[in-house]
Amino acid sequence: MLPEFFSPTGHGVLPAGDTWTFVVAAALAVIAGAAVQSTVGLGLGLVAAPVLSLLDPTLMPGALLVTVIVLPILTLFQEYRHVDWRGIAWGLPARLPGTVLAVWVVAVLPPRALAGMVGVMVLVAVGLSLRSFRVRITPASLVTAGALSGFAGTATSVGGPPMALLYQYEEPARVRATLAAFFLFGGALSLFALAVGGQLDTRIVVVGLTAIPLVVIGFGAGVFLRRRVNAARLRVGMLVVVTASAFALLVQAVLR
């Protein structure tokens, strides 16, 4: 029974039953994304979401949200003293309306359309991350970013960029810790909303839980890279990979 959970459904680029290709590709994406997020504060959703959507969009966004929840816990164990709790107090409640809207979107969109939506969200996130403008951290900007993050994070599991834009000029430890706290509470809210909306079935939960050890491996790799690899270069490499994945998703959504 268990191997059937990891067999792609054929809605993505893999044919139904191509289990080993799915497992290897998904595992590498999760480890790489976790390593990047452990280093710069976000990246697991950006890297893994387009890959998983290409492989089997029926698992999105639930499986990745289940997997991702452990990473902010690991980060907070290390850096909880650096959390901007004032920012969390403003941004987190604003996530609720965006989350509710996203649950409806996930319920009505077919897998191909959802995959295309992930591709668009990733490209928007990449475009915003390349801009050099600075957004001041204010109650208004925190509420706006929180609502956008709630929608994007619940619908596509790529919810980090709106908050990351606000904190991009802060100290690295403050960025990682604050985003981790936001992802932890916000991710739990998104999972609860998807469960209530009937968007979390047994297969999605099993695949997500099975990938958690891969996140731990990626987190450890990120801690190692944090001290030895230039974060700016790692960020550029990540953006190149996720941009290619996003374009592939859009092509797949149009042609299939």
Image (cartoon, rainbow, N blue to C red):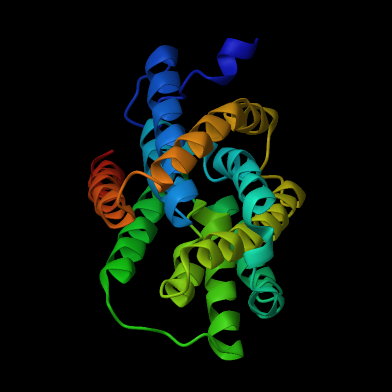
Q: Quadrant of the C terminus?
A: top left
Tell me how many marks there are.
0
Is 44 left, or right, of 229 in this rendering? right
Give percent across and percent down for residue 243.
25, 51
Is 153 left, or right, of 119 in this rendering? right
Q: Quadrant of the N terminus?
A: top right
- Residue drawn at x 66%, y 61% as measured from the top left: 181
In the depicted structure, whether residue 242 falls above or below residue 105: above
Is 93 left, or right, of 246 in this rendering? right
Residue 135 seen anywhere in this rendered image of the structure: yes
Give percent across and percent down for residue 146.
59, 73
- Residue drawn at x 60%, y 57% as measured from the top left: 180
Residue 112 seen anywhere in this rendered image of the structure: no
Q: Nearer the viewer, residue 105 or 175?
A: 175
In the depicted structure, whether residue 86 falls above or below residue 187: below
Q: Nearer the viewer, residue 218 or 162?
A: 218
Farthest residue, direction front:
227
- Residue drawn at x 39%, y 60% as measured from the top left: 121
Give percent across and percent down for residue 231.
33, 54
| Snapshot quadrant of residue 206 | top right
